[in-house]
Amino acid sequence: MPGIRRQARMIALQTLYEYDIANHAPEEVLQRHAEERNLHPKVVEYASELVLGAYNHLADIDAHIQSAAREWPLQQMARIDKNILRLAIYEILFNNTVPAKAAINEAVELAKTYGSETSSRFVNGVLGTIFNRAQQQPISKAESEVN
């Protein structure tokens, strides 16, 4: 039985994928998964955080994907890969409750499970680029005065 966060990521991925394919409301899709699978409340709670977080930051997240994978327009990218990236980028750049490297590793595992033969390398490369860029961001003057 996978851990709570891994299960939550799997459900969140399936939810975002359905939203991307059929434009069904993410909250309703997640609720349906929770009821059909009798998911543990902690799984539903974290999956909800991931889904709503990625959904609410979609424009920013997609801009990061496009910037890191210029040769792959979002419309041409495999939808499963795109949604794995969305989840991981939310965790890395906006959520910050797990170490970025753990979020990347989890995304690569999702890509191995749900994606194509090349998905894990693609996801790892895009997330590595985004992570490295995030590490190089200069601290703004206001933030440095707080520390």
Image (cartoon, rainbow, N blue to C red):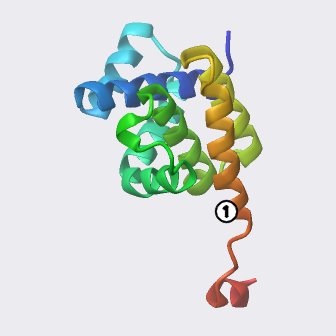
Q: Quadrant of residue 111?
A: top right
Residue holding disc 1: 134
Q: Is residue 37 above or below residue 26?
A: above
- Residue 117 in view (yes/no): yes
Depth order, front residue of 97/83: 83
> Is 66 on the left-hand or right-hand side of 58?
right
Residue depicted at 53% across the width and 18% down the height: 40
Q: Where is residue 122 in the image (x, y as percent from the top left)?
A: 62, 34
The quarter of the image holding the N terminus is: top right
> Is 132 on the left-hand or right-hand side of 63?
right
Q: How many marks?
A: 1
What amino acid is labelled 1 in the image?
A: Ala
Depth order, front residue of 52/136: 136
Residue depicted at 54% across the width and 22% down the height: 10
Q: Where is residue 20 in the image (x, y as percent from the top left)?
A: 32, 32
Residue depicted at 51% across the width and 55% down the height: 64
What kind of element bears circle 1?
helix
Q: Position of residue 52 (x, y in %)?
A: 40, 43
Q: Is residue 23 above or below residue 92?
A: above
